[in-house]
Amino acid sequence: MPILSRNTLNSELLTFENEALYLHIDAQGCALLRRNGQKPTFQLQEPVLLAHGIMTDSQTVHLVILKSSGDLCYTLVTGASAPQTTLIAKLDVRGTKYRRLFLFPQGKVIHIFYASTHQSIPGLWRIEHRFWNGSTWQSTHMGEVVHPKEPLYNVNLDNQGNLHLCSVTFQGRNSLLF
């Protein structure tokens, strides 16, 4: 049974050519649904804080999910095969808030970005980059942005496979674009 709730955290439409899937995310979990499908292609019935997905072909969906337990997981959903889930990291969800989760699969390399802020300095957001290099998960700190509510940054991939990070931060009355 699909997870449907009025308390939706986020919903995404995932597309590839003529195929489309709907990623429904709420506090009780997430479900990956086809347009006319009754049964979810993938379903997680655990509390979720953030999730993001991308289709790389008509049968392949990549998902990154931050569970309320602090587990940051990567899941690969392919055609008729069972979904494969990997625990990337255990994050502190008690003293830290997380926002703006991005996922960019590039062949055997997987890029994941997210921002976090600790409750002791709630306006300072750290942008983190986790990536699978084909054999292990690596992590690097990309920088900080200052904003009282949301981390103002975006990541995109160009047609040559380069990642571009754009961020806005505040310094006194001035805003700085990086």
Image (cartoon, rainbow, N blue to C red):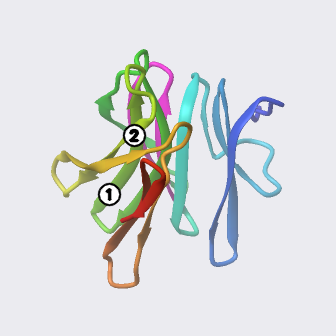
Q: What residue is drawn where x is 49% and y is 27%?
A: 67
Pointer 1 residue: 110
Q: Is residue 5 left or right of residue 50?
A: right
Percent position of residue 40, x then y:
69, 42
What is the quadrant of the N terminus in the image?
top right
Pointer 2 residue: 125
- Asked whether residue 115 is drawn in magenta, I would say no
Please state which amino acid type lies under the numbered disc 2.
Answer: Trp
Percent position of residue 51, x then y:
54, 42
Percent position of residue 136, x then y:
17, 47
Most frequent secondary structure within the magenta stretch: strand
Q: Magenta segment, which residues?
A: 60-77
Tell me the CA gap for discs 2 and 1. 22 Å
Q: Quadrant of residue 79?
A: bottom right
Residue 23 in view: no
Q: Residues within 10 Å of mark 1 (few under 14, many from 20)?
A: some
What is the quadrant of the C terminus in the image?
bottom left
Residue 72 in view: yes
Q: Residue furthest bottom?
A: 160
Q: Provide the secondary structure element on which disc 1 rests.
A: strand
Q: What residue is drawn where x is 38% and y is 26%?
A: 121
Please state which amino acid type lies under the numbered disc 1.
Answer: Ile
Q: Provide the secondary structure element on which disc 2 rests.
A: strand
Percent position of residue 127, x then y:
34, 47
- Image mark for residue 56: none
Q: Is residue 41 left or right of residue 136?
A: right
Q: What residue is drawn where x is 40% and y is 84%?
A: 159
